[in-house]
Amino acid sequence: MKAILKREFKSYFRSPIGFVFLAVFFAYSSLMFVFNNLLTQQTLMKPFFAEISMIFIFVIPILTMRSFAEERKSKTDQLLLTAPVKVTDIVLGKFLAAAGVLLLAVVATMFYVLVLNSYGEPVFSEIFIGYLGLFLMGAFFISLGIFLSSLTQSQVISAVSTLAIIFFLWFTSSLSIKFANMMDGAFNWLGIFLDWLIDFLAINNRFADFTLGVLNFVPVFYFVSLTALFLLLTVRVIEKRRWK
């Protein structure tokens, strides 16, 4: 797994993908820090986390689109699949490489905390929880992107499908439809279930606690379990292809 991790991590910076990801993330996060903290002269970073999390919708698909799709298109995946390496190690290696690039970007923005500390007294515990939530959410998006990349040999399809699903999950909480009010009688239970499902899937609802500096078990479990689920699904997809 270490060899795959190193190879994949280096590959992000042998191509423009890693640099594009970091450049877009830094540019956007810098603007959000200026507008939400420096210009307003406040040390509260809740608006900052809420704003920069939205850039994940657009940059994570770029980061993950080539994970398996590129190798499948160029047929180099056959060399990897026939190597004496576990499929789990292959998937985890690719996931950890992408997560490493994400972590690099997130940690670099902690420079903003040092700037705030020179002007005021930020609450470091709340800021740490905010960064933890940011990374966990990003890791979930990466696992989703890698899974979708394993289903196709087109990087464009992989990126667009990842963006579409993340976009849907992000704005699910904005839906004003209440199915429980629409479904009366015998189907009222279905309406209640659909309302609960939409509320559960809404990423904003899970990420909100982190932006407030509150560490709850439910949102942590939400992101960790979904990350593990999509990594497991990716392993199953690759294993099925390996034995064809």
Image (cartoon, helix red, strand yellow):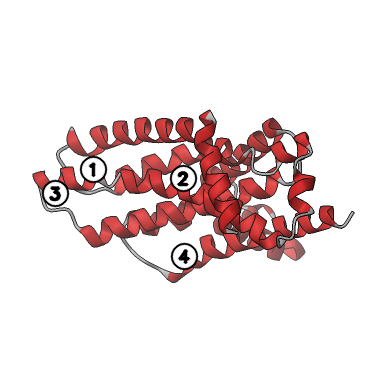
Q: Secondary structure at mark 4?
A: helix
Q: Earlier in the sequence, mark 1 or mark 2?
A: 2
Q: Are marks 1 and 2 in contact (CB under 8 Å)?
A: no
Q: Secondary structure at mark 3?
A: helix
What is the distance, in whole Å, between disc 2 and disc 4 at their CAs?
21 Å
> Is disc 2 surrounded by few (<14), some (14 to 19) or many (20+) residues within 10 Å?
some
Would residue 21 be found to the left or right of residue 154 on screen? left
Q: Residue at x 62, y 55 (%)?
A: 181
Please tell me the numbered disc located at residue 117: 3
Q: Identify the residue under disc 2.
A: 101
In the image, residue 99 lies at what x, y percent? 50, 51
Q: Identify the residue under disc 1.
A: 112
What is the distance, in whole Å, between disc 1 and disc 2 at their CAs?
19 Å
In the image, residue 207 lies at what x, y percent? 43, 54
Q: Earlier in the sequence, mark 2 or mark 4?
A: 2
Q: Earlier in the sequence, mark 4 or mark 1?
A: 1
Q: Identify the residue under disc 4.
A: 220
Q: Earlier in the sequence, mark 3 or mark 4?
A: 3
Q: Residue at x 76, y 65 (%)?
A: 186
Q: Amino acid at mark 1?
A: Tyr
Q: Nearer the viewer, mark 4 or mark 1?
A: 1
Of 168 and 140, which appears nearest the observer?
Answer: 140
Q: Are marks 2 and 4 in contact (CB under 8 Å)?
A: no
Q: Is residue 146 visible?
A: yes
Of 232 and 38, which appears nearest the observer?
Answer: 232
What is the distance, in whole Å, between disc 3 and disc 4 at their CAs?
27 Å
Q: Residue at x 12, y 53 (%)?
A: 121
